[in-house]
Image (tube, grey):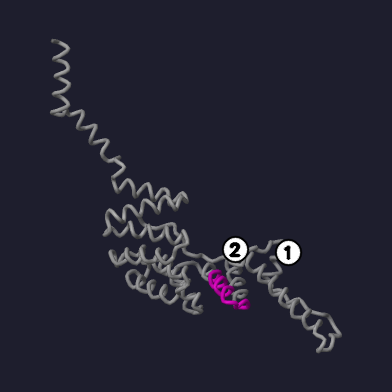
Amino acid sequence: MRHLSLRCGVVLCLLVGCSSTKQLVQRVNPLKPTDHTLQFELARASEADGHLVKAERVYRSLCESEPNHAKYHHRLGVVLLRLGQPVEGLQELNHASQLEPTDLNILNDVGYGYLRSGDTPKAIETLTKARKIDPQNKRTNNNLALALGYQGELRESFKIFQQTMTESEALANLGYLATQSGKTDLAIKAYSRALTQDPDMKSAAEALAQLGTIHQDLESSRSIAADLDPTKPKSMGIAHTTPARSPEKFALAEAGVSSAKSSKMSANQPVWVGEAK
């Protein structure tokens, strides 16, 4: 009988529910795999670690479960852009922006998405809208300045950069955009002034050294081509001359600064970090 009563007591506790059991359930429930908040945080962690396919799968599932949740579509759009799927990525980002029209993080990523996909006018339109919401937002201003620079509006681009960073950084960015536009002379002037204001700016030094090398190569190529052209008289003097180096370039050569290997030199381009959750 004693064993029977004990068994009955256990059954009664399970049927009625003792306080300790309820507390255990309360502790376990927040960790259920179906909890969307937990799933989102795990997907964010996967995204941060570079496991983009895994993050994409979770974000898609969350979007299907809660189609009106802007941040799920936002993160899915960002991941799709990083996976090289700009069309679908922009669709998701625009959907997120429709759900949260004044969210600057979303608008910035929409603008940057257009910029990466090559639609510079649309990027400028989106980022200008974001700037009207918060004219002081640094990320918005940097992205807009970058987009304007890609469109060839270097004066306006430089003006915005000056509002969000130091003069030397703004000059370095101008040098990068001028390089991308093929305006090598302007790029050299911008990098030289940046280095004059901040002699420790290594990125500007490397870019300036490389641009000097490019100029020398161009001069050499032109002269050799002229010498090899049988229709033109041969030069009686030196085949080509090396352009005179500015004081900044001379100082760089004396210091032994190596040139950068990449043609994309010191741009402070927007990245995917630093976003608000």
Q: Counting residues from the N terminus, which is met first, the one under dot 1 or under dot 2? A: 2
In 3D space, how far apart are the residues under numbered discs 1 and 2 (Cα atoms)? 17 Å
Foreground disc of the pair 1, 2: 2
Work out whether residue 262 or residue 46 is closer to the camera in this orientation and state it: 46
Name the residue that disc number 1 marks: 254
Q: Residues within 10 Å of mark 1 (few under 14, many from 20)?
A: few
> In this rendering, would 206 be left or right of 34?
right
Work out whether residue 245 or residue 65 is closer to the camera in this orientation and state it: 65
Image point 54% across, 66% down: which residue? 267
Magenta-highlighted stretch: main secondary structure?
A: helix
Name the residue that disc number 2 marks: 203
Image point 40% across, 68% down: which residue? 140
Residue 102: quarter of image:
bottom left
Could you tell me which quadrant the C terminus lies in?
Answer: bottom left
Q: In this view, does 51 lie above or below 269?
A: above
> In this rendering, would 219 be left or right of 30?
right
Could you tell me which quadrant the N terminus lies in?
Answer: top left
Q: Give the range drawn in magenta.
A: 171-185
Image point 65% across, 63% down: which residue? 261
Residue 274: quarter of image:
bottom left
* Residue 186 pos. (x, y %): 60, 77
Image point 78% across, 83% down: which residue? 226
Q: Amino acid under label 1?
A: Glu
